[in-house]
Amino acid sequence: MSGKPLAVDCPSPVGPRNCGQLSAASASEAVQTRADSSEASFIGERVIIVSPATQVSRGGAALRRNLNAGNSGRAARRGLPVVVLLRHPWRVPELPEVEVLVRHLAPLLRNKIVRSVAVRKAKVARPSTERELRAALTGARFVRLARRGKYLVFTWRRPGRAGDVTVTGHLGMTGRMYLLPKRAPLPKHAVVVLGLCRNNFIYEDPRQFGRFTLDDSAVRALGPEPWDRAFSVEAFTAALRRSAQAIKVKLLDQSLVAGIGNIYASEALFRAGISPRRAARRVRADEVARLHAAIREVLAEAIECGSTIPLDFAGDGKRDGLFYYGAVEGNSQFYQERLLVYDRAGKPCVKCDAPINRLVQAARSTFFCPQCQR
């Protein structure tokens, strides 16, 4: 697809199937974005690229009829793609969710040896191939698992061979990684399976926007971690001074600081009292210092939260949205309460009771309090 897609706000809480209910009025309020299909794959929470010629589940025909009634219909008739923004987002894993998964998986994989490798969907391994992964990992012993930004970095060691093997993993929108007894049937959406001894390592990804690959170029392009010395207040300030982007959009730049996504960018800006609309270069030095501290605080608190509750990493139970994976026993209310602005549009601000607002920036939803954030 080529050209600039149009972003269309869709009231569906469950995905593209119900986007057929999009009104002509909503379609006529579409706004242009610069997202392309590859970028949208990793935007995650709210973005679905819809080709005008593509049926979007059972609601696709109705969606196209409604889109044709508005400005986005003109784009569709010109053959441009349409970006559908879901009003109630899928929560996708950010730094804290990936960190908690790393802490869960690392001890389970300790000293495990890969006996077999199966790539069931070639897309998630690209640019690597199943043959390359099999050659690199078969017989290799697990050494360590680390997090870099939103990526999982697996290190394996092959006996008698020089150098370790590094595999980069990314959960995308819907990915899960867990161990499953070999006697259990493979999940329908298992895209990579590593046979260990008594268990299989499963990478499950229904939408296949994630990665499990030997290619580490994405990791090498990342900026510093939020707790690195390189991410100092001074360096942060200097980077923002050079940017005319809105501060919320700039925070999502993974070369600035790795691991921040939609959820924690909104939360950090709220704590710092900074409007997400403000140009990054217009954020004052004292505000930058507050924001720097807030970023570290919200991420650390989220990691602590996710580390203290029993999470359903394999997705066996009810998917209640708790910390992306869902809780073993289900407790989504607690998840909602720990977030002060994200996905709380229309609800009262916890500080001033003004309704939380939602706006779209760079094809992603932003939540903020117009009274507390200036």
Image (cartoon, grey):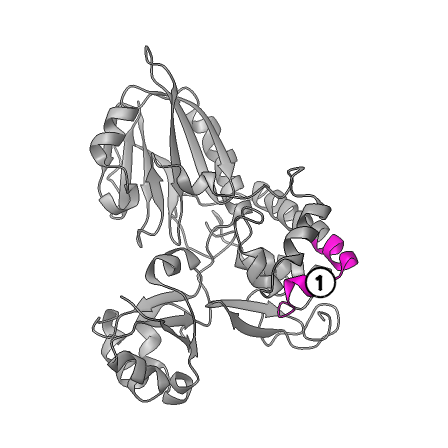
Q: Is there any visible trace of residue 369 in the rendered image?
A: yes
Residue lying furthest top: 160
The spot of residue 154 in percent (x, y) is 42, 31
Magenta segment: 276-291
Query: Which one is in front, 223 or 334?
Result: 223
Q: Position of residue 158 (x, y in %)?
A: 34, 17
Q: Is residue 305 above or below residue 9?
A: above
The picture quadrant where one finds residue 1 is bottom left
Q: What residue lies at 70% left-to-right and 52% top-to-bottom?
A: 237
Q: Quadrant of the C terminus?
A: bottom right
Q: Is residue 230 magenta?
A: no
Considering depth in this image, is 182 or 255 the residue closer to the camera? 255
Magenta highlight on residue 277 = yes
Classify 10 Å Cα crowding around label 1: few (below 14), some (14-19), many (20 and above).
some
Count of picture labels: 1
Amino acid type, mark 1? Val
The residue identified by callout 1 is 283
Magenta stretch secondary structure, dominant: helix
Where residue 249 appears, x then y in whole percent? 55, 62
Tell which of 292 and 1 is nearer to you. Answer: 1
Where's residue 36, x and y in %?
36, 63
Does any portion of residue 182 appear in the rendered image? no
Horizontally, residue 183 falls left or right of residue 367, namely left
Q: As drawn, which residue projects farthest toward the front?
A: 242
Secondary structure, mark 1, is: loop
**Residue at coordinates 35% horizontally, 66% vertically from top-left?**
48
* Picture layout, residue 294 above or below residue 309: below
